Image (tube, rainbow, N blue to C red):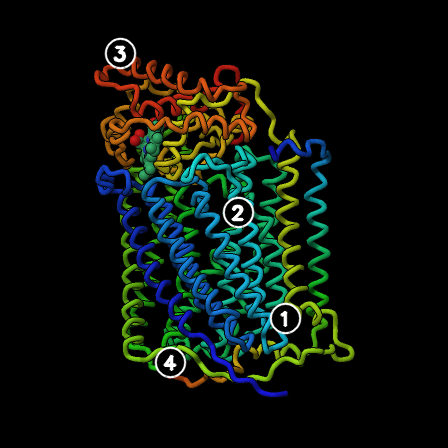
């Protein structure tokens, strides 16, 4: 069935190379993105879990 | 901006939390039972329902989908509401999700016990349950995206990214790998065969680890670790790099489960390269977690919650270092099929998934029940007994795996196998199996202590079912501030984000799989390989029903140590009619790919009745009901037709003749058995079909294949 659909693709060697290229460009994209993030946003983001108001400190510790 | 008042739903969190711990105990208990069965084989009581081959899938599925699954939902529901400043989108959907998931678990447990299985690891459930899973998963997705859509917080915290990628990827994986054609309500055949089926299965299996046991738990880590430590994550920027590189790389690494198999070389190499690349994001995540505690280590010493999380994150680091190492060909050659893999898996499951879950539950319970934890002391006890349990589990299994592998590969000076009897290599590691079961029991004991602690905490407090919260609504026509960067466009908008995450995972899957499905030359056909006869096909289905693949592989790797022991190494072309493939992943018993013709029929007859008759000291369970139960042939014709639809070349109209052929072959085998001394052999019994299948295995290319053993 499925395996018979498109039998004519050739040049299998190209697949790993394409995949590597996609990955590298993607990685560069992410790194630039992160480097350019401004401090204010980052600090707002990283504090998101902490700034809700249920901190009544009722757990066993403390 | 008017401040709105709303309520978080803690009841759903409590329900998932209790389900987590209850199923955790069940799943771990079954694990301990099958661990003991490996050295006390009569513990299956010669009953079909309690044999290792049926209980092992029950154990793995219970731990993965029931324990870890409910844990994910517990934490994701709790944190998603807080991070989006919104109640879940729909209480009804939450309830359907909860009860639907528990129903799936119960159905799954029943079906495994009754031998209803597809045999594909962690995807053993039959098609009606697969459909139910899809529906419930979609309910979860709607509930989650609905909550995100009505959020009162513009930004999506990184934990939510991990949840989104989980929801999407698990859906894709589940649907692609569960493509099967029903024979009847409780039986289906995978639409993929042989190598393709194996690749699809391990693309799934690997990414189930990635997107069910890793990404959602990282989401939990990024929320609950800062919560428990009361400080923000070490580096938010690192968490972004962590996220994207992790999901992007993970999806490619699946073929590392199939190294040195009949899978084409290029796919194996792709799997290795990406697996090694995975160390970087994984360790980035681990360090990010551990460094969050910088300057708070004094608290770690006192707080059991932080202790659980620290060991959990460390276990994550260990298993994500070990995994890539196991993907290196020369290492994989030693560890694959052995208990090393089992040790590896349990460092991840017990350490990472288990301990993050326990840490999270201990943190959550006092809060939603508005009281103190019943006993910090007991939580500490749980921590220590659990940690020791992991050590007592993992170390003996590493040792067992290594020992057995070296014994498999040992040659005498004259070039013969040092241990030609497989059983000898099993008996050598039985002491390790005993210690391992003690380790598992300790971990289970810890879980029971935890359950008691949670129960007492809940009893002492009252559930804050609807927790009041306030936040301003989001402005409807929000404009990005001048100079805002495109990254904020991506990060703030759930839809864009989801699309890109999907693209990232689809590329990985597609590049790997499309060539596999499309290029014929990837699976060279072998002219002498013919479809199974109807009787063999029925025998194969018994093999699947009994879960023999949980102990036996059918994939001989091209090493001299394997070709000497088992015969000619396995070729991709031999499996083209195998819907599903049955390569297996672990050799508690010997490989069976070339078992055909190795023994007379009567040997199998007696061996299945009681393995210890033929192989004294064997730990294989008894299967004597196969000698008594009649073979059910009412679906034989349908099975042939379904196989034809899948492309197996039976002659036109063969289904009509199948039953006759089946009977003729069965009579022949019964006659053989009688001449070999089994006086009461009866052609209508299940054992006859199983013998037919076993005697057929690997024989298609016998005789005309030249031995081309390579390596070692």
Q: Which residue is drawn at 27% across and 45% down?
A: B431
Q: Pointer 1 indicates a residue of which chain?
A: B
Q: Pointer 4 indicates a residue of which chain?
A: A
Q: Identify the residue under disc 4.
A: A59
Residue B227 located left or right of residue B156: left
Q: Identify the residue under disc 3.
A: B675
Q: Which of marks 1 and 2 is nearer the N terminus?
A: 2
Q: Pointer 3 indicates a residue of which chain?
A: B
Q: In what element is the residue under mark 2? A: helix
Asked whether B592 or B191 is in front, the reply is B191
Q: How far apart are marks 2 and 3 (CA)?
A: 47 Å
Q: Distance between the residues labelled 1 and 3?
A: 75 Å
Q: Distance between the residues labelled 2 and 4?
A: 39 Å
Q: Identify the residue under disc 2.
A: B204
Q: Nearer the viewer, mark 1 or mark 3?
A: 3
Q: How far apart are marks 4 and 1 (CA)?
A: 30 Å
Label 2 Cα neighbours within 10 Å, binned few <14 / some 14-19 / many ≥20: many
Are dots 4 and 1 on a single chain? no
Instruction: List x then y, in percent, for residue B664.
Output: 37, 14
Instruction: List x then y, in percent, for residue B594.
Output: 43, 25
Are dots 2 and 4 on a single chain? no
Q: Earlier in the sequence, mark 2 or mark 3?
A: 2
Q: Identify the residue under disc 1.
A: B237
């Amino acid at each position: 069935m499925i395996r018979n659909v498109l039998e004519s693709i050739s040049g299998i060697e190209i697949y790993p190379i394409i995949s590597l290229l996609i990955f590298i460009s993607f990685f560069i994209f992410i790194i630039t993105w992160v480097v350019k993030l401004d401090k204010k946003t980052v600090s707002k983001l990283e504090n998101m879990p902490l700034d809700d108001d249920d901190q009544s400190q009722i757990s066993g510790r403390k | 901006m008017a401040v709105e008042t709303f309520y978080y739903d803690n009841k759903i969190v409590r329900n998932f939390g209790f389900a987590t711990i209850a199923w955790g105990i069940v799943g771990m208990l079954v694990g301990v039972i099958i661990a003991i069965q490996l050295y006390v084989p009569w513990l299956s009581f010669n009953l079909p329902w309690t044999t290792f081959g049926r209980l092992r899938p029950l154990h793995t599925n219970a731990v993965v989908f029931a324990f870890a699954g409910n844990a994910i939902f517990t934490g994701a529901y709790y944190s998603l509401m807080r991070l989006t400043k919104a109640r879940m989108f729909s209480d009804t959907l939450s309830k359907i999700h909860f009860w639907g998931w528990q129903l799936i678990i119960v159905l799954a447990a029943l079906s495994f016990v009754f031998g209803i299985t597809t045999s594909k690891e962690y995807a053993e459930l039959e098609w009606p349950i697969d459909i139910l899973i899809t529906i419930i998963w979609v309910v979860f997705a709607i509930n989650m995206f609905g909550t995100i859509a009505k959020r009162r917080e513009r930004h999506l915290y990184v934990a939510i990214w991990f949840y989104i990628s989980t929801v999407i990827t698990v859906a894709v994986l589940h649907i692609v790998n569960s493509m099967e054609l029903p024979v009847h309500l409780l039986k289906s055949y995978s639409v993929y065969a042989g190598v393709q089926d194996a690749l699809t299965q391990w693309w799934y299996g690997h990414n189930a680890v990635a997107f069910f046991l890793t990404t959602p738990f990282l989401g939990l880590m990024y929320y609950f670790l800062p919560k428990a430590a009361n400080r923000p994550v070490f580096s938010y920027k690192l968490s972004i790099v962590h996220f994207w590189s992790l999901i992007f790389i993970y999806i490619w690494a699946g073929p590392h489960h199939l190294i040195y198999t009949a899978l084409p070389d290029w796919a194996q190499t792709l799997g290795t390269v990406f697996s090694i690349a995975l160390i970087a994001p994984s360790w980035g995540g681990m360090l990010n977690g551990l460094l969050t505690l910088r300057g708070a280590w004094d608290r770690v010493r006192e707080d059991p919650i932080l202790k659980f999380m620290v060991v959990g994150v460390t276990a994550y680091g260990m298993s994500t270092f070990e995994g890539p190492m196991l993907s290196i060909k020369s290492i994989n050659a030693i560890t694959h099929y052995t208990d090393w893999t089992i040790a590896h898996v349990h460092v991840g499951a017990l350490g990472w998934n288990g301990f993050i879950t326990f840490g999270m539950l201990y943190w959550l319970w006092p809060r939603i029940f508005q009281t103190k934890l019943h006993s910090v002391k007991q939580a500490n006890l749980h921590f220590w007994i659990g940690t020791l349990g992991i050590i007592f589990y993992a170390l003996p299994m590493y040792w067992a795996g290594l020992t057995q592998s070296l014994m498999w590969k040992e040659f005498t000076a004259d070039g013969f196998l040092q241990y030609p009897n497989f059983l000898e290599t099993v008996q050598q590691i039985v002491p390790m199996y005993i210690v391992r079961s003690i380790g598992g029991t300790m971990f289970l004991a810890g879980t029971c202590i935890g359950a008691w602690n949670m129960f007492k905490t809940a009893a002492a407090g009252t559930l804050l079912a609807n927790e009041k919260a306030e936040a301003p609504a989001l402005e409807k026509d929000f404009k990005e501030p001048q100079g805002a960067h495109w990254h904020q466009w991506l990060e703030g908008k759930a839809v864009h984000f989801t699309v890109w995450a999907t693209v990232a995972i689809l590329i990985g899957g597609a590049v790997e799989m499309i060539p596999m499905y499309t290029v014929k030359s990837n699976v060279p056909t072998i002219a002498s390989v013919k479809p199974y006869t109807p009787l063999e096909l029925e025998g194969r289905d018994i093999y699947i029903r009994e879960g023999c693949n949980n102990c036996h592989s059918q994939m001989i790797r091209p090493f001299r140590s394997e070709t000497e022991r088992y015969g000619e190494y396995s070729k991709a072309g031999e499996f083209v009619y195998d819907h599903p493939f049955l390569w297996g992943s672990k050799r508690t018993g010997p490989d069976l790919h070339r078992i055909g013709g190795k023994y007379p029929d009567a040997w199998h007859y007696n061996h299945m009745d009681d393995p210890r008759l033929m192989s004294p000291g064997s730990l294989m369970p008894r299967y004597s009901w196969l000698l008594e139960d009649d073979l059910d042939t009412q679906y034989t014709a349908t099975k042939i037709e379904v196989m034809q639809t899948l492309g197996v070349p039976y002659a036109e109209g063969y289904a009509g003749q199948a039953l006759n052929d089946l009977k003729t072959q069965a009579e022949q085998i019964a006659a053989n058995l009688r001449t070999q001394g089994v006086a009461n052999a009866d052609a209508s019994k299940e054992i006859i079909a199983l013998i037919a299948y076993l005697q057929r295995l690997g024989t298609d290319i016998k005789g005309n294949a030249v031995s081309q053993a390579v390596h070692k």
